[in-house]
Image (tube, rainbow, N blue to C red):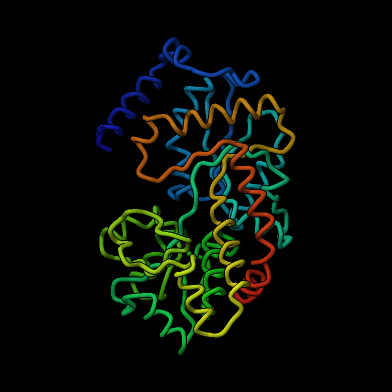
Amino acid sequence: MVSRRQALSALSAWAGAAALGCGEAWRGSTTGPTCGGLAGRRIRWIVPNAPGGGYDAESRLIEPFLEQRLGAEIAIDNVPGAGGILGARAIAAAVPDGLTLGVVGVPGLLVAALSRAAGAPNPASDLTILGRISRSYHVWATGRNSGLETLDDALAAAEVRPLVFAINEVGSASFVSITAAASVLDVHVEIVAGFGGTRAASLAAVRGDVDLVGFNFDTIVDLIDAGELRPLLQVSLSRIAPHQSLDGVAILGGEDGWALRRTRARGRDIDQTRRHTQALVDVMGAGRVAVGPARLDTGLSACLSRTLHETLTDARVLAASSRTLDAASARVAQDDVQRAAAEAPLLLPDLEAAMRRVRQ
């Protein structure tokens, strides 16, 4: 087994060799076709978030390997703002020639589009899906000194006052997972938006400024490992990772999950809770996808999808990644996005009401 240190060292050496102009080796290692003449061209890869986050880290991880396979230069362009809408809009508005691509988070963008947020492209119809990069496996986590040891403690506190969450932006994947999970649990929450990234929001929980955060597990696992954050809820139907910090941590969905447990105890509609929980899992499960503008040439999009999948499943990429990549082909990713689009309307009333509250 290759250690992460060894893998990163190999990656660094490879990138340095490429930067020194090993043109012969570069072209010789390209495994696929040139994808519509993209070889030798400059591709703008839009990340709809600020540098340093999960979208940015994943994009910069795959950048040199995708460059190698395409024989093209890829320039990462961070376009943050409006919960990812600005970056997604820039991709959707680009000429469909393969020279503008990027990554979007389906949960937040889909909800924004269905809520008719200004200029939000619908990932199910307004973009070309090239493949899935990773899924979203969210947890609710609290600071080490919050006094909340388990989800039971948090729910008991919520009987007295709303649970306060910190997030980056309204309409983000975190906003969706927190709001929808709170709804099926029948718990009152207050969301404080405007934190400058996942770490800033998480540190607010560490300091005790807020009760909880709800983020992708991979993005906060370092703070969990350090003992600064403690996970209380897995927003899923089953355990999301073998990490020891999740031993005994509550799971939202499933017949023995906390959503149905709360629903039965409160005499609420069990079938509705099942449907809404499944809708949340399906929406979040669509994850982060690589996209291009709509109306990409069929042959070009097929080539890009194949090349992207080869890149994401490359042993060097997997060895160098500290994150959980979950690659899927364009067809599989498109099916997941369409399923999420069909299920998301069930969640919209609660999400739109929460948006109005936060923006007041």
Q: Is residue 57 above or below residue 13?
A: below
- Residue drawn at point x = 44 percent, y = 29 percent: 64
Quadrant in the rendering for residue 179: bottom right
Going by the picture, which residue comes out furthest to the bottom?
160
- Residue drawn at point x = 56 percent, y = 43 percent: 289
- Residue drawn at point x = 60 percent, y = 51 percent: 106
Q: Percent from the top left, x then y, of residue 145?
A: 29, 75
Q: Percent from the top left, x then y, of residue 71?
A: 52, 19
Query: In this figure, what is the number of numbered marks?
Result: 0
Q: Is residue 143 above or below residue 225?
A: below
Going by the picture, which residue comes out furthest to the top?
24
Quadrant in the rendering for residue 152: bottom left
Identify the image quadrant of the C terminus: bottom right
Side of 337 where 203 appears, left or right: left
Identify the image quadrant of the N terminus: top left
Side of 242 where 268 appears, left or right: right
Q: Percent from the top left, x then y, of residue 232?
A: 37, 70
Q: Percent from the top left, x then y, of residue 76?
A: 52, 37
